[in-house]
């Protein structure tokens, strides 16, 4: 079974979201997603300042097996991207829920996060 931290919210498209008290959120791909992709070789990051809609593709993760779009779990504006992934995309395989976050968002509506899956429901989805 994949590692599914209980303090994160999850999208059915296998992204995770961690909301901070200030209305910002960190977004990445799940352990399940990285293990399904295999060895990650490239990450296309979104542009800082981009306004994303929930469910909109904001980047691509490429692996030796496939290229996969990455989707915004909620609407918001990109505040920061993880530049370390430009030179070390394999971090997504090593630490998908911590060091290898993809972007930080200013949430359009912090209540949107409530519509995402909790850890138990995400475990059922990938189980």
Image (spheres, helix red, strand yellow):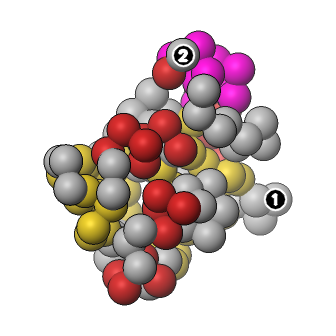
116 left or right of 54 in image: right
Residue at image coords 60%, 27%: 1
70, above or below 21, in the image: above
Q: Which mark is first along the chain, 1 or 2?
A: 1
Q: Secondary structure at mark 1?
A: loop
Q: Residue at horizontal 78%, vertical 42%? A: 7
Question: Does residue 107 appear in the picture of this structure?
Answer: no
Camera-side residue: 23 or 127? 127
The stretch drawn in magenta includes residue 89: no
Residue under pointer 2: 127
* Disc 2 secondary structure class: loop
Q: Position of residue 82 (x, y in %)?
A: 49, 77
Q: Nearer the viewer, residue 8 or 3?
A: 3
Other-residue count near label 2 (Cα within 10 Å), few / some / many at <14 / 14–19 / ≥20: few
Q: Which residue is mark 1?
A: 21
Residue under the image location 20 percent in, 56 percent down: 64
Q: How far across and down, in percent of the image, does residue 59 sit?
A: 28, 60
């Amino acid at each position: 079974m994949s590692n599914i931290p209980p303090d994160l919210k999850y999208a059915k498209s296998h992204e995770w979201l961690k909301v901070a008290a200030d209305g910002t959120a960190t977004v990445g791909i799940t352990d399940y997603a990285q293990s399904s992709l295999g060895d990650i070789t490239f990450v296309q990051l979104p542009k800082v300042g981009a306004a994303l809609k929930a469910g909109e593709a904001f980047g691509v993760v490429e692996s030796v097996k496939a290229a996969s779009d990455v989707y915004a779990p909620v609407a918001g504006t990109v505040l920061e991207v993880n530049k370390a992934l430009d030179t070390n995309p394999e971090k997504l395989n090593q630490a998908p829920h911590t060091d290898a976050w993809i972007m930080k968002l200013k949430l359009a509506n912090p209540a949107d996060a409530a519509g995402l899956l909790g850890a138990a429901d995400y475990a059922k989805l990938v189980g």
